[in-house]
Image (cartoon, rainbow, N blue to C red):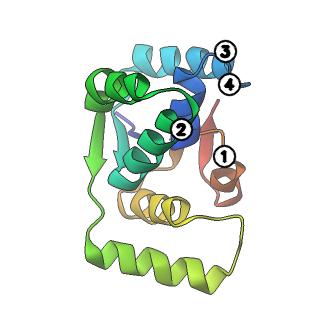
Amino acid sequence: MTRVFVDTSAIIALLVDSDSAHASARVAFESLSVRQAPLLSTSYVLVETYALLGRRVSITAVESFREGFAPLLDIVWIARELHEKALDELVKRSSKKLSLVDVSSFLVMKEQKIDEVFAYDRHFDLEGFRSIK
């Protein structure tokens, strides 16, 4: 069964009713559920998601995500070596549009041989990953 990487952009789209991609994210997530696709993400995506939900929605949304959605994800915890590798890659690319979370996600996907991503961030497409939307 093909694993799918889950990005912050998809989580926010799925959980925030007012997000412009909400309807699309619901359909995509239902498709992933039917496929019973294993979902993988990183600790950095979790941190980014908690921050955005807390800022844009509420601390209650953070708690709901933590208890209801986060357990559906297999999490790769970003250790020092991967953090430094991602930071080196970010500096090398010198792009203001990429974040450390993005680059660490790309590296994890490559290491884990994952080519499919649930995301609404065009950077994944530009990296050659296949987006589920």
Q: Amino acid at mark 4?
A: Asp
Residue 23, numbered label:
3
How would you rate the neighbour count of disc 2 (Cα within 10 Å): few for under 14, some for 14-19, many for 20 or more? few
Say what secondary structure mark 2 lies in: helix
The answer to which of 78 and 50 lies nearer the viewer is 50
Q: Amino acid at mark 1?
A: Asp
Residue 55, numbered label:
2
Task: Estimate the x, y position of residue 60 in percent, counting from the top left.
Answer: 38, 22
Residue 121, numbered label:
1
The quadrant of the image that shows the N terminus is: top left
Q: Amino acid at mark 3?
A: Ala
N-terminal of the pair, mark 4 or mark 1, is: 4
How would you rate the neighbour count of disc 1 (Cα within 10 Å): few for under 14, some for 14-19, many for 20 or more? some
Residue for badge 4: 19
Is the residue 128 above or below the residue 14 in the image?
A: below
Residue 5 seen in the current view: no
Disc 2 versus disc 3: nearer the observer: 2
Is the residue 29 above or below the residue 125 in the image?
A: above
Say what secondary structure mark 3 lies in: helix
> Alpha-carbon distance for marks 4 and 2?
14 Å
Task: Estimate the x, y position of residue 69 in percent, counting from the top left.
Answer: 34, 25
Say what secondary structure mark 4 lies in: loop
Task: Estimate the x, y position of residue 122 in percent, counting from the top left.
Answer: 71, 49
Q: Identify which residue is drawn at 65% across, 29% down.
A: 133
How would you rate the neighbour count of disc 4 (Cα within 10 Å): few for under 14, some for 14-19, many for 20 or more? few
> Alpha-carbon distance for marks 1 and 3?
16 Å
N-terminal of the pair, mark 4 or mark 2, is: 4
Say what secondary structure mark 1 lies in: loop
> Alpha-carbon distance for marks 1 and 2?
19 Å
